[in-house]
Amino acid sequence: MDAREFQTADSTHQPEHLYKGRRASLPLDIVVIGCGLGGLAAAYCLAQGGHKVTILEAAPAIGDVGAGIQASPNVSRLLKRWGLGPHLEELGVKPQNLSIRRWKNDEVVGFTPFGEAFVKDYGSPYYHIHVEFLSLMHRFCLTRLNQRADFHHMLYAAAEPHCKIRVDCRVVFVDPSKPSVTLASGEVVFADLIIGADGVKSVTREYVVGEPDEPRATGDAAYRALIPTEKLLQDDDLRPLVENTESIIWMGPKGHIVGYNIRAKKEYNLVMIHPDGAEGGVESWTAGGNVERMKESYKGWNTVVQKLLALIPSTLDWKLMDRDPLPSWIHKDGKLALLGDSCHPMLPYRAQGSAMAIEDAAVLGNIFSHCSDRSQIAPLLYAYQSLRYERATATQTSSSLNRHIFHHPDGPEQEERDREMRAAMEDAVRVARGEQSTLALAGNANQWADKKKSAIQFGYDADEEAEKWWLMNGDKLMSFVPISEAVN
């Protein structure tokens, strides 16, 4: 199937001049394994840096199996820089605030302003967007994709004119030393560099680790569903969920629910974290779930939640698996590196998984725009890792922390958590009135209220960090003796 079948009228865009107009003086042949958000972003950024990029995707088509995703300011600033701002404005929804609520009675115990407050504090908006996931779907999905310009489609439209995208190309073997990959068809594809952007079930990760790398179960799973907002607008209790444009988290014993609008407020996205009682289970975004079991998981929760669940005819159930941070994202031969969920899979409790993958891609493209010799590939990969490793690992830890915070059973720990969140909410109201903050918010149970933590997370500019790093370290890195000369 030719990737050109995906070409759409909106694939032309006007990005800012990336990397200060800098392009690699030696264009590399780069293979990116995986056509998800991270793979598309990596292909786009590496191509903008002057390289010849081929994406190899196992799925034969892009299917319309999707859900909501959050594009925080650290991501939206990059997407706007890539010329995708108009699409974000047209199709995304900008939540005005985060509302954190009790499971039993819908009481608001936590509140953080988003909207213009985030633009002022972090330089770019917060968006909720629909995203499609790659799946073994039929050809008719191509037509439907062209009608729905979501997050994945936006990145596809940006990347496709600048790289070669090959679907139905399942990688069955990687030779990191040549480097090359062997496809299920028997074809061998050679490259100067391989980027493994093949997600949580990564094939390439095992080659970097050196052995099979099995995930461990968290004990949680996530039901996911989309509800047409026209149904919510017909109910007095549910109408405010559409009209108020909030991101809502309902916290409860051993689980929580996240809800928000997507697709220009045409659909309401629900992610419902619950204890995973299944033996084995499927680590997949597209595994079907049982609606009656879903409803049973939230028996006794408040009326708003019950009414939302009653509107769900079918659901997907995503088993949440965890992996420890890797000691390195780079194969010892220096020609294979990992990106996104293949090296730092994120649990969804902080909504930063796609953000970290896209930041990785931006840094990788920026750093490799300096390439002038093949001997620099390994040093440039280690520069990428040094820029990204600590931040991605810290975000993994922050995501796991929210699981503990949100899932307290009713009792002393829950009461202390709610007290902290209420104090932060009252402080936010004072600030909104023009008064000074009177509360030290560091370490607050509402991580979004922690100004220092939010500045680190949402104020980050991947390109700016890469440029600063290069000013401090680039001359030293580029003065390395070429590897071929060192061997001789």
Image: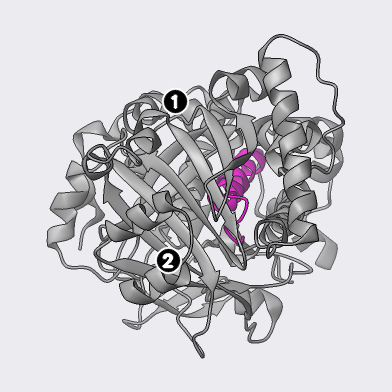
| Residue at the (65%, 54%) spot, across then down | 374
The part of the image, by quadrant, that contains residue 436 is top right
Residue matched to label 1: 15
Which x, y percent locates residue 242?
35, 35
Which x, y percent locates residue 331?
69, 70
The part of the image, by quadrant, that contains residue 231 is top left
Q: Residues within 10 Å of mark 2 (few under 14, many from 20)?
A: many
**Of residues 200 and 238, the one drawn nearer to the viewer in this rendering:** 238
Which x, y percent locates residue 425?
69, 31
Tell me the quadrant of the picture where the N terminus can be found.
Answer: bottom left
| Residue at the (80%, 50%) spot, across then down | 416
Type of colouring: one colour
Which x, y percent locates residue 426?
72, 27
Q: Nearer the viewer, mark 2 or mark 1?
A: 2
Residue matched to label 2: 223
Magenta span includes 217:
no
Residue type beneath disc 2: Tyr
User: 468 left or right of 39?
Assistant: right
Q: Is residue 455 visible?
A: no
User: 112 left or right of 332?
Assistant: left
Tell me the quadrant of the picture where the C terminus can be found.
Answer: bottom right
Please, what secondary structure does the residue beneath circle 2 have? strand
Please determine whether, in this image, residue 297 is positioned above or below residue 97.
below
Where does the magenta region start and end?
346-370
Residue type beneath disc 1: Pro
Label 2, label 1: how many angstroms apart (C-alpha)?
36 Å
**Of residues 485 and 215, the one drawn nearer to the viewer in this rendering:** 215
User: 340 left or right of 474?
Assistant: left
